[in-house]
Image (tube, helix red, strand yellow):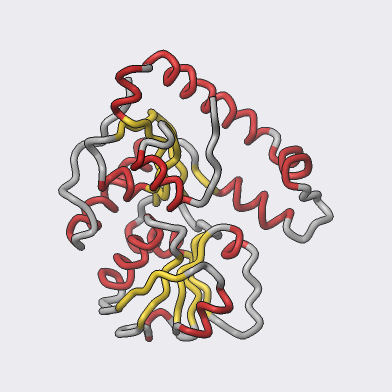
Amino acid sequence: MDFFQSHPAAINEAMQKGEIDAAPVSALEYFQRQNDYLLLSELAIGTRLFARSVLLLSHKKIEELDGAKVALSRESLSSAGLLRILLKKRYGHNNTFEVADQDPEVMLRNYPAALVIGDQALFCQPKELIYKYDLGESWYTWTGKPFVFALWAVRKDFAAKHPGPIRSFCALLKETLLDNLANLENILEHSFGITPSDKRFCQTIGYLVNLQYQLDKTMKEGVEHFFELAHAEGLTPAPQPLRFFE
């Protein structure tokens, strides 16, 4: 078994090309290619409240961003779709967007606001005073539903030919998830070199504990609502029922 490690947008592209067979793809990636993928049951990456690693950084209050050009990290798909929906549907704004390399300082020099994800959002410490908006929190405050950033999916053609290995892989993922959540401190220290004395420790462990990894009933409701809004905004084709590998 070979593994591929990269940021979400690169993982999406590798799945599209068939370079990898199973992965946590962006929710919008699954939605845009529903006929190509099957979901692995009960597995997702989302949040019921705040995300911490998906932020809108802005020189202005979000209520004052109508008409502004906003930079989008090229490393994300679902987060970019979420921001477009929030700005238009929640705040009534009409914005333009430009994809940019993810560098918060450079982005904020060139744009009034920027979407930043991952470590650069989690550990962001701007040199100037800016506003930070957690998109997971903004979505939950607006809809009352969790937000799902990624769904574990398998290519449908691969699953048809190799159902046994996929079942074993899915079971291993669930077992590993439970084990990892029970040993977060050891994982941070031995895999990432982050100890309790590190200033990043509390931020990282709080972030990992807050994330939701199970695609339960409320998480499904959240992702289905997101799909409906994304389709209404022309970001995706018409939604179909979630389809799972059995």
Residue 53 pos. (x, y %): 54, 59
Q: Quadrant of residue 34?
A: top left
Q: How many labels were placed on the picture? A: 0
Residue found farthest to the right: 197
Q: Nearer the viewer, residue 166 or 15?
A: 15
Q: Quadrant of the C terminus?
A: top left
Residue at the (38%, 56%) spot, across then down: 77
User: Is residue 19 placed above or below 90 in the rendered structure?
Assistant: above
Q: Quadrant of the N terminus?
A: top right
Residue 221 pos. (x, y %): 30, 44
Question: In the figure, is residue 185 to the left or right of 90?
Answer: right
Q: Nearer the viewer, residue 122 or 236?
A: 236
Residue at the (26%, 69%) spot, across then down: 89
User: Is residue 53 placed above or below 48 in the rendered structure?
Assistant: below
Question: In the figure, is residue 142 to the left or right of 94?
Answer: right
User: Is residue 70 placed above or below 47 in the rendered structure?
Assistant: below
